[in-house]
Amino acid sequence: METIPTDSLSWLLEHACPSIRYRLRAEILGQSASDEAMRALQAQILQDPAVRTVFSWQQPDGWLAQDFHGTHGLEAGLRILSEKGVDPGYPAMARALEALENHPERLERGIGKVGKILDDMGFGGSLMIRAAVFAHAGLENKPGVQAQIEQALAGFQAVLGVHSLDDVVEGYRRKLVFRPGVQWPGIYHLRLLAYTHSWRTAQNRKMLADAIQRLIELSPIPDISVRYASQLISPASFCMHSFNPAMESMDAAAWMMAFHRMECLARLGVMAALPALRRQLDVLQGSLDAQGFFAMKLSHPYFTKWGCYQGLMLETDWRTPARCRSDLTFRSWLILHYAER
């Protein structure tokens, strides 16, 4: 991968929002959070309207809003703060993370008993979501995270024995459901491993690369429900339906999912090793102009509306083309950086 062209790098460092400037310096340029310029950017991030909105949700005990899982709840709020670059040690965010640690009894809020069912059946439910939220905030050492990392590895390991979707899927009430005893990875498996490091042995890295290759071969993957007695439950399969999309013909919604999935895969360290993913990186690189700016015009609520699954916009809005270009350029270089690191 080429280094970021001076034109786009200089422009982002001067004109992008504080979150992009902070994360660009921290994640790509390796600048210390203790530097004076970084502390100044952190102060500006704390005034971001989306960040202030999340802080306004905070209850006296630190919990954000009422729900755990949902657009207006602790998970979504902490995802926004992490993506915006808020220091996890900042008091309001630290209190929210402490509330997540101290109140496991609230994990049913917004997801109900489905969260426990999905955990018990190996599809990643409330406990895995909780672990992924901690991991995104850089807190891999929190209680329960290591156990969920093992569950996430097991979910990807299970894919290796699948030669056809018929091996794991059957029909039920005119829908596709997983066969009894099957495990399958969802978006929280992918996120959790992307943001943690303790699992990264040579053996696990190879297993994950082989599992992602198998998911590439099985793509596109249809909607598949989990059957619990007579109840049908949707696992968290957002961004997990196609690991080998036709990127040249994707619409804006598909591009958002590609950005999200590719960033996770890049952080895993598997993209450069798999030809299909390497081709996706080539398409992404080819979407940048000579100055290093993302050249396509994309607009969809998946980018701009934040929640547990969607949302990648760090700028305050996309009312001007420059803000959209800023976000998409930063996200492109983030993926390319982690893919080659």
Image (cartoon, rainbow, N blue to C red):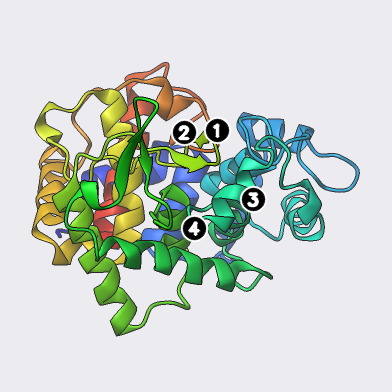
Q: Are marks 3 and 1 in contact (CB under 8 Å)?
A: no
Which of the 4 image quarters holds residue 330? top left
Disc 1, SS: loop
Image quadrant holding the C terminus, namely bottom left
User: In terms of sequence position, does the residue under pointer 3 or pointer 2 come before the other?
Assistant: 3
CA–CA distance in space, label 1 to label 4: 24 Å
Which residue in the protein does label 2 denote?
Answer: 311
Residue 341, compared with residue 20, is above or below; it is: below
Q: Amino acid at mark 4?
A: Gly
> Mark 3 and mark 2: span between their CA atoms?
26 Å
Q: Residue 221's quadrant in the figure?
A: top left
Per the model, the C-alpha gap separating discs 3 and 1 is 21 Å
Q: Residue at x 55, y 33 (%)?
A: 307
Q: Earlier in the sequence, mark 1 or mark 4?
A: 4
> Please, what is the three-letter code of the amino acid marked with disc 2?
Gly
**What kind of element bears circle 3?**
helix
Spatial distance from mark 2 to mark 1, Cα to Cα? 6 Å
Q: Which mark is residue 307?
A: 1
| 4 or 2: tag closer to the N-terminus | 4
- Point out residue 193 in the picture as x, y percentages from the top left corner: 43, 64
Q: Label 1 is placed on what type of residue?
A: Gly
> Which dot marks residue 122?
4
- Of residues 325 and 175, the one nearer the viewer is 175
Task: Indicate the position of residue 299 as horizontal and vertical percent values.
Answer: 33, 20
Picture quarter with the N terminus: bottom left
* Residue displayed at 36% across by 60% down: 28
| Contact between labelled residues 1 and 2, with CB atoms less than 8 Å apart | yes
Residue beneath disc 3: 116
Crowdedness of circle 1 by 10 Å Cα count: few (<14), some, many (20+)? many
Residues 145 and 39: in front is 145
